[in-house]
Amino acid sequence: MENSEVRLMKGNEALAEAAIQAKCDAYFGYPITPQSEVLEYFSLEVPKRGGMVVLQAESEVAAINMIYGAAGAGGRVLTTSSSPGISLMQEGISYIASAELPCLLVNVNRGGPGLGTIQPSQGDYFQATKGGGHGDYHLIVLAPASVQEMADHVFLGFELADKYRNPVMILSDGAIGQMMEKVRFNQPEVKRIPKPWATTGKNHYKDRNIITSLHIQPEKMEAVNIHLQEKYTEICKNEVRFEEIQTEDAEYLLVAYGLSARISHKTLELAREKGLKVGLLRPITLYPFPYERLNKLADKVKGILTVELNAGQMIEDVKLAVEGKTKVAHYGRMGGIIPGPDEILENLESIMKGK
Amino acid sequence: MPEETLSKKDQTEDTLIEQECAEEEWEVVYERPFTLLDTHMHYCPGCAHSLMHKLIMEVVQELDIQEKTVGVAPVGCSVFAYDYMDIDMQEAAHGRATAVATGIRKILPDRYVFTYQGDGDLAAIGTAETIHTINRGENILIVFINNGVYGMTSGQMAPTTLIGMKTTTSPYGRDPKGMSHGHPLKIANLIAQLPGAFYVTRCAVNTVSNVRKTKKALLNAFKYQQMDKGTCFIEIIGNCPSNWKMTPLQTNKFIADEMLKEYPLGDIKLPSKEELKDLEAEEGVV
């Protein structure tokens, strides 16, 4: 396949193709809707093309622990799942964050809580951005809003994971994963960095390597925590990514990520047609969150509406960012329902009218 | 300890001992394997773990595979196994050691990968991973220490606890039906039925001859790994003086009299002669 070629693919397939091209060493996963295409794509392609291990694990619990072992052995590794499966993985993700193992995790978010529904949702925002499992830790969280970004974020995700020795999560949703769009794989050369800390076997040239998250002396455990927090501070300094659309003259600002941002973009267009000065800020990294930029934008807008496929989760970060400088409201649908752009506009207009 | 940090007094003493040895023509008949770190272990006196750590490290030394061995420690008393074994190691979440080992072996297919797990870790919380790892025939060695009790959390009932045995969560004795405690889980017999299991055996370290047999089993199991024929599983009936409330010597007797009745020693699944032909020709595996 020519890399410059435009292909029509599902988001989940584009993600799998990108992983092969990013020279992923191993994929461990367990089927769950709406992301099973990832494992299916690998199962079809990798036997023909070689170069990586693909293993259908017996559970998400096993898959995430295979990720732990393989990442600890120095591999570039990926697992994907959807909401209930990601919940099952949380213990392992906490261990991985503590042991500082670089890996790429993907949550193709579906509606919850519980077994929920297989339709798209953004109900896992808190879980993804605030840690998710036990203890003080953060994942780097990327939020693709297109099939193209499903692919692009794989390359970016592996790179960030290696750079910071930190798990990276792509927080997608059932729509971005399932929908077909054109995608191009014109990625720069894949960067790999040495991993001298990996457990590849002790030799005469180095001390033995231990991968662990256990530090039974509280002083040591605190030191590990301080180190992690310093790393997160560094990540927040360097890795904030967002997109702005027509914010220059905006009087009202929509804040949305992923699928919600796609719909909100249409809302913005409808609003502009009516002469309403509406802008859109789309966080691309949900952790680190674009607090600073939002704080600046809050100085010049009359109000902010966050649009999410949940009961209002990212709105908490938006409120933290604007520090009370302007009104912040939420509009969202839950349980797998996707709002139309007109529905969002209606809500925005009622806010503008002060209702 | 590096030589330069030795005090003068120690050096003098060493020199004296060396001279003495030279005069009397002493011969080294036994020493700690260099693969086992020279440090105090946290295990209770009489515990099977310290002996098992040593046996595994002796085998790693004898096979000259220190640079090619990666171990996985469990959650349980042996959670700190990596503090004693001088090899690269990973510490797994409770019950997930064989999944972690699967991940390691997939990335490093020419390494010797083993897990070291207790009965709570392997036969309770990790049962699914144990069965599926072996069902896939992952080329790893699983060392399973079965002492019939949760050691680290101080003596609760395990899936392997003998019927009638008193623990802190079965203070009136394990009662399979009345208290829904279930029956002693013979996981080695269970997994031996899986086509992915290549070598399954049960050993103990309560007598000198059993220690020797255990070492032989470990030696063979390590060698089998690189044949890519499937999973090797060695169950060890281990001593737990603290939680059995016995002296170390009493535990040896308890193993012989009680534990081995429920968990008889011996091979449960052996590779066929045909399967071992190449290895025997090369290395003389018995």
Image: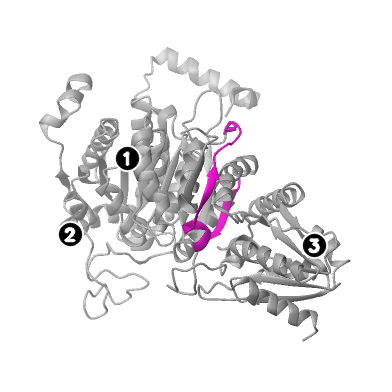
Query: In this picture, is B19 found above or below B249?
Result: above
- At 50% across and 53% down in the image, what residue appears? A11
Chain hosting mark 2: B
Q: Are marks 2 and 1 on the same chain?
A: yes
Quick one: SS at disc 1?
loop
**Could you tell me how far apart the alpha carbons at marks 1 and 3 are, in whole angstroms?**
52 Å
Chain hosting mark 1: B
Q: Are marks 1 and 3 on the same chain?
A: no
Mark 2 vs 3: CB contact within 8 A: no
- At 45% across and 74% down in the image, what residue appears? A114
Residue that badge 1 annotates? B140
Q: Quadrant of residue B282?
A: top left
Q: Where residue A325 sits in the image (x, y, percent)?
A: 86, 72
**Neighbours of disc 1 within 10 Å: few (<14), some (14-19), many (20+):** many
The number of numbered discs placed on residues in the rendered structure image is: 3
Quick one: SS at disc 2?
helix
Q: Nearer the viewer, mark 1 or mark 3?
A: 3
In magenta, the rendered stretch is A166-195
- At 77% across and 49% down in the image, what residue appears? A237
Q: Where residue A190 sits in the image (x, y, percent)?
A: 57, 33
Which amino acid, mark 3?
Answer: Leu
Q: Nearer the viewer, mark 2 or mark 1?
A: 1
- Most extreme residue toward the right is A299
**Could you tell me how far apart the alpha carbons at marks 2 and 1 are, in whole angstroms?**
27 Å
Which amino acid, mark 1?
Answer: Ile
Question: Which label was assigned to residue A294?
Answer: 3
Residue that badge 2 annotates? B262
- Residue A187 vs residue A136, the one in the foreground: A187
> Does residue A271 appear left or right of residue B26 in this picture?
right
